[in-house]
Image (cartoon, rainbow, N blue to C red):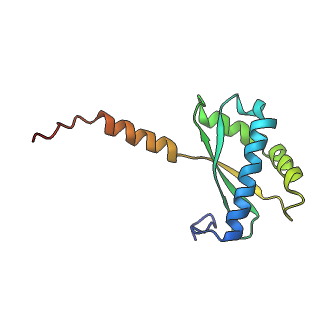
């Protein structure tokens, strides 16, 4: 277990609940909350649940955002509104609505940086 209380290998229950949260949050961001996203295209890359399902760590991919930290701050300032919208959607499927922790997903950005670095390398072609 790491220092945030998240297990590296989540149980099936955590994975199912995480997928439900991911699907519903994606829908909320796409349909209902465009105004708080500053028209940035955001996808929910992954949701990791705490073992007791009370906390959802939501990884956001912001491909077209000019300033990711500003968008993240906007999302965090509307967190209670987003959580309420989530609760309205999952109330029949879940006992509790998890606390939401939004973080920027760096995986895609790091992969692009590595790909750009590899492309920039001047590797001579092998002679036969």
Give x and y (percent) for residue 31: 79, 36
Rendered image quadrant of residue 61? top right
Q: Nearer the viewer, residue 84 or 93?
A: 93
Taking the view exactly as shown, the residue that stands out farthest to the front is 128
**Camera sees residue 109:** yes
Picture residue at 65% right of the left edge, 42% below the top: 43
Picture residue at 90% right of the left edge, 60% below the top: 92
Give x and y (percent) for residue 41: 65, 33
Picture residue at 70% right of the left edge, 28% below the top: 39
- Answer left or right for 93 relative to 70: right
Q: What quarter of the picture does the N terminus occupy?
A: bottom right
Q: Does 34 sit above or below residue 8? A: above
**Camera sees residue 100:** no
Q: Does 46 sit above or below residue 9? A: above
Taking the view exactly as shown, the residue that stands out farthest to the left is 128
Q: Nearer the viewer, residue 20 or 37?
A: 20
Give the mark count.
Answer: 0
Q: Does 47 sit above or below residue 60? A: below
- Answer left or right for 35 relative to 121: right
Give x and y (percent) for residue 19: 70, 57
Q: What quarter of the picture does the C terminus occupy?
A: top left
Give x and y (percent) for residue 70: 65, 33
Picture residue at 71% right of the left edge, 69% below the top: 13
Q: Does 75 sit above or below residue 10? A: above
């Amino acid at each position: 277990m790491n220092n945030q209380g998240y297990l590296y290998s989540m149980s099936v229950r955590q994975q199912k609940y995480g997928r439900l949260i991911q699907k519903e949050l994606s829908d909320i961001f796409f349909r209902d909350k465009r105004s708080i996203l500053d028209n940035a295209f955001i996808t929910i890359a992954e949701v990791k649940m705490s073992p007791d399902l009370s906390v959802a760590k939501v990884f956001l991919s912001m491909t077209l955002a000019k300033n990711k930290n500003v968008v993240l701050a906007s999302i965090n300032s509307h967190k209670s509104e987003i959580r309420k919208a989530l609760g309205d959607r999952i109330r029949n499927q879940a006992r509790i609505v998890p606390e939401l922790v939004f973080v920027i997903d760096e995986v895609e950005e790091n992969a692009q940086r590595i790909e750009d670095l590899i492309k920039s390398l001047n590797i001579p072609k092998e002679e036969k």
